[in-house]
Image (tube, rainbow, N blue to C red):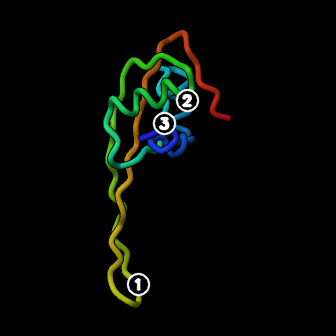
Amino acid sequence: MKSHHIIKRPLLSEKSTVQSDESKRYSFLVATGARKDEIRRAVQDLYKVRVVGVNTVIHKARDRRTKYGLVKGGLSKKAIVRIHPKDTIELI
């Protein structure tokens, strides 16, 4: 997979902003089939930083009931990437 297919978008929330300021951890929404080594290479290619570690979380959306029946929630994958203390990523 190419780097721009693996990293879908950065996640900007209060928690991820505080983590990026204090401990150099950035959150990204990634492809569900991406492995940790692929995510590491994609972040290094796109943002030109040194990646120290990658943690991933798979989130299942809740099922919704409509008038036509039950709609299954989809899967999404989030990657929390820790970078070298001397590097920074400009997301905005």
Using residue 53 as the reference point, say whether residue 27 is left or right of it.
Answer: right
Residue 53 image position (x, y, % from top left)? 36, 22
Quick one: which residue is furthest to the top in this view?
Answer: 86
On screen, 37 above or below 86? below
Query: Which residue position is annotated with label 3?
Result: 3
Task: Determine the CA span between mark 1 and mark 2.
Answer: 40 Å
Q: Residues within 10 Å of mark 3 (few under 14, many from 20)?
A: some
Residue 4 image position (x, y, % from top left)? 52, 40
Quick one: which residue is furthest to the bottom in this view?
Answer: 67
- Please say if the residues under marks 1 and 2 sit with CB atoms less than 8 Å apart: no
> Residue 9: which numbered mark, if any?
none
Using residue 90 as the reference point, say whether residue 3 is left or right of it.
Answer: left
- Please say if the residues under marks 2 and 3 sit with CB atoms less than 8 Å apart: yes
Query: Which residue position is annotated with label 2?
Result: 46
Residue 66 image position (x, y, % from top left)? 40, 84
Task: Determine the CA span between mark 2 and mark 3.
Answer: 7 Å
Which mark is first along the chain, 3 or 2? Answer: 3
Secondary element at image label 2: helix
On screen, 3 above or below 29? above
Amino acid type indicated by mark 2: Leu
Secondary element at image label 3: helix
Which mark is first along the chain, 1 or 3? Answer: 3
Amino acid type indicated by mark 3: Ser
Q: Residue at horizontal 64%, vertical 27%? A: 90
**Looking at the rendering, in which quadrant would you find the C terminus?**
top right
Tell which tag, 3 or 1, sits nearer the viewer. Answer: 3
Amino acid type indicated by mark 1: Thr
Query: Which residue position is annotated with label 1?
Result: 66
